[in-house]
Amino acid sequence: MPKNSKVTQREQSNEHVTESVADLLAHEEPLDYKSSSLNVVGATGKKVPQIEVPEDDGRPAWNSKLQYILAQVGFSVGLGNVWRFPYLCQKNGGGAYLVPYFILLLLIGIPLFFLELAVGQKIRRGSIGVWNYVCPSLGGIGMSSLMVCGFVGLYYNVIIGWSIFYFFQSFQYPLPWSECPIRRNGTLAIVEPECDKSSATTYFWYRQTLNITSTIAESGGLNIKMTLSLLVAWIIVCLAVIRGIASSGKVMYFSSLFPYVVLFCFLVRGLMLKGSVDGIAHMFTPKLEKMLEPQVWREAATQVFFALGLGFGGVIAFSSYNKIDNNCHFDAVLVSLINFLTSILATLVVFAVLGFKANIMNEKCVVENAEKILGYLNSDVLSHDLIPPHVNFSHLTTSDYAEMYGVIKAVKEGGFAQLGLEPCLLEDELNKSVQGTGLAFIAFTEAMTHFPGSPFWSVMFFFMLINLGLGSMIGTMTGITTPVLDAYKVQKELFTVCCCIVAFFCGLLFVQRSGNYFVTMFDDYSAGLPLTVVVILENLSVAWIYGTKRFMQDLEDMLGFRPCIIYFYLWKYVSPLCLIVLISATVIEMAISPPGYNAWVEELAQERFQSYPPWALAMCFALIVVAMLPLPVVFIARRLNLMSDGSNKLSVSYRKTMMKDMSNLEEQDEARFILCAKPGEAPSSAPAHRAYLTPGGTKTLDANSLSPNSCYGTSYQNAAISPTTPTTPTTPATPESDS
């Protein structure tokens, strides 16, 4: 060791070295974060005066625990809970689908949600800073999260814009989509043919709202109504996030709670409607054989994955504003269960209303086909003897029609197809599953036209969609702004406004007449595979590079208790395995399914599948590549020392000098030095080891484990002691084996 090194000077000095706080940054002893001071023992064996650890390190904080929970709930509970989960439940076996969903929620949902909450709260940085800190070589994880947030935010706010348009259109009676428009040709009035072939709500969506083109290649120019709606949506989002959690936290009180008020109102109203019980019974009648299909488990895993907002960076950003000793394990379980119960509540509401709609459509089918039968009877195509004597055409029930239909089919077996009669089964109507915009803007909207006081319910429904979307957009925007503001000292308000302006102009792609096709493209390709890759790398970097045992011990230091040992195995083995299977299944699905979109054909007044043209196909794969590009670029750049490891953003100013002075210490003496003892002597006041949590109990930590390169230790909190140094984490982690 150099004779003039700081360590040597300290050992030879008989004075109290109060500036030894700098040296203590290498200290990796357990720290009671709940106490406000550190007891530091100097080299002379005397006590150095206690140094207060400031409660406020300059980072914004939530006003209350409730505000934070509502923010996480608002981010995780979104449009997918209303229009994706019910569809998957119906498609994959009804009540039987809840079994694989809940199992996967326990195996990958809650553990990975807990992991993101913990790293954000411990390191107190956004996604870029967190993963630069955990593993600099995988620092591209945070950048990929930011890219995906950008892509998703662009098209997600378009959906809020659609909801805003419908919200304002709902202040009319009758609702503008309740009837087909009438086209007049002189004295002749006819129903609009496109509407007559489809339905009033379908026509209003595709023609009046989107004014959609027939192919993605045909732009059609900007849709002015949707452009203005998108502008309003971005103004709302900008106002909500412009001051960070100081503004978004207050918005969350309303945007997170109001949807539950609307859902409960719809549930009560829906249960009072005729046929609602049929819809709920159909929904939750389990088809147990479906549980054996791999596709069901894949879709359940995907829904769990996206329902909690994993990988976006919003979860990490929100938790980074927590106190260091916040019980994030309780938060993870609570928010996950709230999300699950919200999905079930939304499913009850959707199928109560769709059961009512199915009964109305079934009765309409019976009336239309009964008129056909009367026409055949009057024209002697059918004999009156085929009609059961108790059937009354003026009060025809569905059971009477079913009986009559069966008799005619049996007698007219050869020519029955020419009659054009339909069976009019309620089960067939209930099996017409729809999701996404088809559910919200067509099926559910059509059902509401039959409600008494339909404008009121329509206003409530679309206002709920706006709030659900706003909660998710706030989390998405926080996942973009927080890591950038952590890394670069820019003015928060100016940066947020600039982001929203740029996003609005980029979002003009989605408000062309062909914009809906690009929304589908971005939804299919910009998030699915990249986010899955991001989350598995998050899992591996913590469990296999940083070290699961070390992470468990850090959690104990932070929370004050040891998390259940099951998390050790879930993080280390189960979650990575499930995610690898999910990635494999996603890639296989993308390879098997031809890339394309459902185009609205005006002449046929229905959707037809069309393959993407070559330029659109290239755009699809470009979205995947661009979202994942930071991962290999950052990895290679840092391996070749072409890029800083990010520690300059996370460490104190004198860290490099201190590390250089310590670099020549032998491991044994280094450990003793850190514990404030002279080389060759046993430490007098601090334990020479620290226990790590292992599946079998505890394991003594050796000198290498106390290296200042470990990143989840107490050095971040110690860095906050000096008023002249940045309150940031210290150095990135070095790989640690769990063996």
Image (cartoon, rainbow, N blue to C red):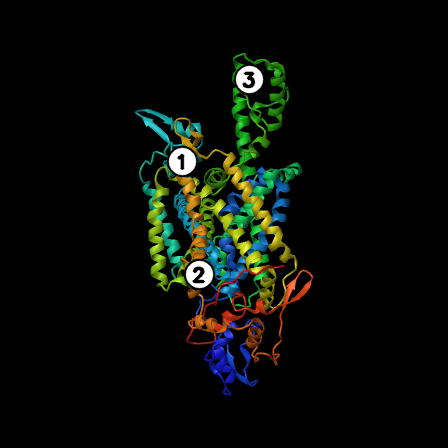
Question: What amino acid is found at the position of numbered circle 1 in the picture?
Answer: Tyr
> Looking at the picture, does residue 191 appear above or below residue 46?
above
Looking at the picture, tell me which residue is in the foreground, 577 or 342.
Answer: 577
Judge the density around disc 2: few (<14), some (14-19), many (≥20) Cα neighbours within 10 Å. Answer: many
Q: Which residue is mark 2?
A: 645
Spot the residue most to the top.
380
Q: CA distance from mark 3 to mark 1?
A: 32 Å
Q: Which residue is mark 3?
A: 417
Can residue 276 be spotted in the picture?
no
Residue 423 on image: x %, y %: 58, 25
State which tag comes first along the sequence, 3 or 1.
Answer: 1
Residue denoted by label 1: 206
- Which comes sooner in the sequence, label 1 or label 2? 1
Residue 271: quarter of image? top right
Q: Quadrant of the C terminus?
A: bottom right
Q: Residue furthest bottom?
A: 14
The residue lying toward the viewer, choosing from 579 and 99, is: 579
Vertical placement of 735 versus 155: above or below? Answer: below
Residue 309 point in image, percent of width and height? 51, 52
Question: Under tag 1, what secondary structure?
Answer: helix
